[in-house]
Amino acid sequence: MREKRLVSALVAVLSQGSDEECCVCLDSLMQPVITQCAHVFCFHCIVEVISQNKKSAACPLCRGAISESGLVHVPPEKQSDAPEKDEASEWHSSAKVDALMQCLLLERSKDPSIKSLVVSQFTSFLTLLQRPLREKGFSFVRLDGSMSASKRSEAMSQFASSTDGSPTVLLLSLKAGGVGINLTAASKVFLMEPAWNPAVEEQCFDRCHRLGQTKEVTVTKFIVQDSIEERMLQLQEKKRKLMSEAFGVKAKAEQRQQARIDDVRILLGM
């Protein structure tokens, strides 16, 4: 009975809005397992933690006792289906969705074989996008951190194929898109919302703008006017400037404190 509850908890984690990450490797969950204390990790990450402290292995989050035999795996069929909850029957479009579809339709009218990445931090948003893509006749696949390695590989192979009828759109979670994959089949990238860390965005974009790319890569970012997203762009620019000045004169404590205060003010629109 307890194992069923743990499996249900794990499936709930995998199917929630954001692409969950392992707190050990700080990457998207791969082969997710849940401990008896109800914390979720990559299988290989938590097994390594346990092997290093066999007699006194403790959960990295709560320090509770853990063992390899106590790890609970989500059944493969539930894991692969977790992010595939169908769109709600009372689904309504939005300005961003409409703008994205207009861009995709325009690109398809120019070249039916053009391939595009649609990137979001939220797996629930990727699920919502499936409905308008189907209605407009787009062939698409999906890749996010909750998928098994075999499902990821299958999605990548389908998207990279140049055969007629192969998928022209890849729904991609931002975190999964920044982890060692090659997406040179795509030349159009659509980012649905800004990330807190600009380096995460750029790492994702570099998956298709790299050696082997034969086309010009275009990145389109969707930003809601007069919203917190505009202020996040300002923060991103500040972070880029800080990175470029990282090897310059070291900032004083007062300057660092003022920089943090300025960040908060930007987000609050003060």
Image (cartoon, rainbow, N blue to C red):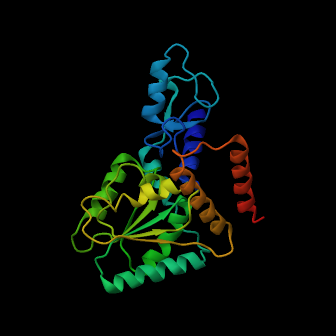
**Residue 93 visible somewhere in the drawing:** no
Q: Position of residue 164 (x, y in %)?
A: 23, 74
Write the residue at 54% across / 56% down.
Answer: 240
Quadrant position of the C terminus in the picture: bottom right
Residue 161 visible in the snapshot: yes
Q: Position of residue 27 (x, y in %)?
A: 47, 44
Give 247 or 266, whichever is nearer the viewer: 247
For residue 167, which quarter of the picture? Answer: bottom left
For this view, does 71 lie left or right of residue 205?
Answer: right
Q: Could you say where residue 144 lies in the image, as x and y percent from the top left? A: 45, 55
Q: Nearer the viewer, residue 168 or 91?
A: 168
Residue 156 lies, with reference to residue 52, above or below; the image says below
Q: Is residue 5 above or below residue 187?
A: above
Asked where in the image residue 38 lies, by quadrant, the reply is: top right
Q: Furthest residue to the left?
A: 163
Q: Relative to 219, is 268 above or below?
A: above
Quadrant where the N terminus is found in the figure: top right
> In the rendered view, does 157 fall on the left or right side of 48?
left
Give the residue at the far right of this rendering: 270
Task: Look at 53% across and 81% down and name the residue there.
Answer: 98
